[in-house]
Image (spheres, rainbow, N blue to C red):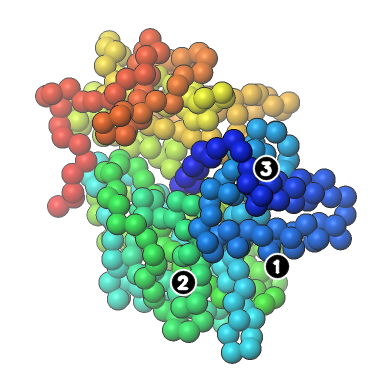
Amino acid sequence: MARFRARSGSKLNRDAQRLVSLATGLDRSGSRVEDRFWEDQLGAAIPKLLKSGQDDTLEAALDHLSELGTGAYEVLIEQAETLSESTQIERDGQLHDVLLVVAPLVAFTRYVIPQGPLSADVLATLTAHLHGHILADNVNLSLVPALVSVDQMPRTFSETWAWLSRLGQHSLTQGSTAQAPHSDAETAPMLADTRYMVAAVSVPVGAPVFRWQTATGDPVQAREQALADWTTQLQPTFASLLPGCGFELLLPDAYYLSNREADRRLRPLSLTAAVNWLQSSVSLEPSDLRAVIGGCGETRIDEYRISFTARDGKDVFYGCVWPLYGREDDAVDAEDRPTVVDEIAAQLKALGVAEIRQIPGLLPAEFCEDCGTPYFPNPVGEMVHAGLPEDASEGPAHFH
């Protein structure tokens, strides 16, 4: 789930200037003692902005630091994420650590991926397995009683903090399930997409949150075992919730970490779903398809857009977006590991797509002004609207 970033103006207000100074100070710190000083200052400044919904100030500081190209950008965005997904709340004289957690799944289908309210029985099952396999003992939990789509998730730091605050308070008072403030925005039918279970967990300050924190052996193996148990136990539950879908359950963890992992896992699944769907919608085997890969962005490649056409045609039937995260780029490192394009091409070849074309250079990341969908490159590098021929089958439909 790529986080929404609103472009800000070039002039920084006083609060944004202070964030820039504090992040730069932390970036240049030479000791843990000094680190704590700057972190405490940011820990006081950022929550004030989140509580008052001043995302523009935070975004302006991030944009400014991004243009400077220093490590202070990573420092500030890490602090913004940490302080919007976690906090401390006092209850009955006891201070508690509160963390926003998501349990993602990635799904693909020829139909529509379900979402929406979960029954009391399903919620009881999820709660039991969260306590049984993921959370440490004596953790308070408040779970949103719905399977949430990316369009209903927070889009800004302050919205994330609002979810954290509301669910966190509920975990300390009533527990079990609670409605989270979310958008009623419609979710576009996608062949591959993410769904999320969202919760806040709370523990006395310093107590472990996750089961792997209390493991006597290797914590890495403990995390892997927790995922294995979670997947095995909940496979039947989600198979009934997602009829007609293939899906993969990911490890429940902190909000931003889990979202990024879900985004990464979704990328290859979106290609799999596209090739499978095109076989039925336009009656073309994978070997009869051509894939066109184009790097898109303003000044650098921010994402790849992959188009699908017939091998003997230029009309784009469908397209997938492969966003880049963190330090991903298209440069081969010293160990000669594959580039991003190599990874995409290998995935397509494994699916049976024999003809793969890469468009050189940087293409504009354009969208349709009418419907907002991305444009995709045709075989000669023109950005066009994807669309099925008139005699093709309809798009994703509900499974019956």
Residue in the image at 47% along x and 58% along y = 159
Q: CA distance from mark 1 to mark 3?
A: 36 Å
Residue placed under numbered mark 2 in the picture = 166
Left or right: 36 in relation to 362: right
Marked residue nearer the N-terminal end (1 or 3): 3
* Residue at disc 3, secondary structure: helix
Left or right: 210 in relation to 128: right
- The part of the image, by quadrant, that contains residue 395 is top left
| Residue 330 position in % (x across, y down) | 59, 25
* Residue at disc 2, secondary structure: helix
Amino acid type assigned to the residue bearing label 1 in the image = Gly
User: Does 40 sit above or below residue 269?
Assistant: below
Residue placed under numbered mark 3 in the picture = 73
- The part of the image, by quadrant, that contains residue 204 is bottom right
Amino acid type assigned to the residue bearing label 3 in the image = Tyr
Residue placed under numbered mark 1 in the picture = 217
| Residue 377 position in % (x across, y down) | 38, 19
Q: CA distance from mark 2 to mark 3?
A: 29 Å
Left or right: 284 in relation to 303: left
